[in-house]
Image: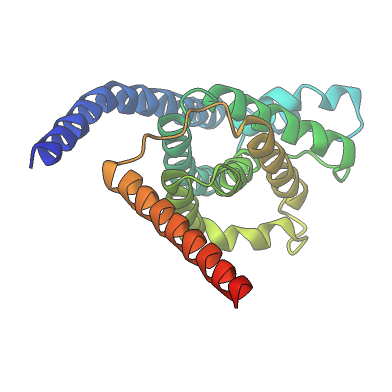
Amino acid sequence: MTELFEQTDADSIKEEKGKPKFLISLFITLSFVLLLWVVKLFETITKTELSFLGVLPRETKGLIGIVTAPLIHSDFSHLASNTFTLIVLMMFLFYAYTNSSFRVFFTVYIFSNVLVWIFGREAYHIGASGVVYGLVTFLFFVGLFRSDSKSIGLSLVVTFMYGGLVWGVLPTDPKISFEAHLSGAVVGLLAALIFRNRDPLPEKYKWEDEETDEDDIDLEEYEKAEKKLKSEEGEI
């Protein structure tokens, strides 16, 4: 009973510590999404076309798109489709992987566009879809690489919610930049491999330790019984 209360107290402390982390994650996420909407509203109000700020592969003037392309969207439906997905994925990233979150985000943001600039078709590539694919891939693979229960659980949630995005890496529609999707996925995978150990593994619950101890005891008893059986066979 005492152990139960101790575990309950520990969980309460964790919840209290998690509140500021949740609010910080929410602030960062909403700030980025708000920036996307401000840019689109600026385009609409001033009737300015900003697609020239996209990534134009293998052209010097297209290098600026490595930084600006994810901020530009073709229309409001394009932006809206990325908005909710970005909110969910960025919240997962900044809340679950606090230590590596900024490194992962900017790695995906920058290097997915670098790959588009190198390998993409000769057209302006715009939109935050590359970032979306990078975050989905990171969250999926980092759970597999870390193999702790919370990371694997988050990987399963991401797979359930966004597993259908896998078809976006194929050139099914000439109007859609599959190169950005594919580049984001590749960079997300590499980021998962590189940053998998940046965040500490979650603490185990006592019942998990108890299960491990019981397994160790069972293994020891099995080895003793096996040795005893071999010795008896030798005597015979």
Q: Is residue 60 above or below residue 177?
A: above
How far across and down, in percent of the image, does residue 49 sit? 66, 31
Q: Is residue 125 above or below residue 171?
A: above
Q: Is residue 97 above or below residue 162?
A: above
Drawn side of residue 19 relative to residue 228, left or right: left
Drawn side of residue 223 relative to residue 11, left or right: right
Furthest-left residue in this view = 1
Furthest-front residue in this view = 235
Look at 33% across and 24% down and name the residue there: 21
Look at 54% across and 72% down and name the residue there: 232
Look at 14% across and 30% down and name the residue there: 9
Which of 151 and 175 lies nearest the eye of the viewer? Answer: 151
Tell me if I can see residue 126 in this picture.
Answer: no
Which of 68 and 166 lies nearest the eye of the viewer? Answer: 166
How far across and down, in percent of the image, does residue 173 sit? 73, 61
Quarter of the figure that contains the C terminus: bottom right
Which image quarter: residue 59? top right
How far across and down, in percent of the image, does residue 112 sit? 73, 36
Tell me if I can see residue 131 in this picture.
Answer: yes
How far across and down, in percent of the image, does residue 190 sit? 72, 38
Which of 36 and 26 lies nearest the eye of the viewer? Answer: 26
Quarter of the figure that contains the N terminus: top left
Drawn side of residue 121 relative to residue 110, left or right: right
Look at 63% across and 33% down and name the residue there: 70
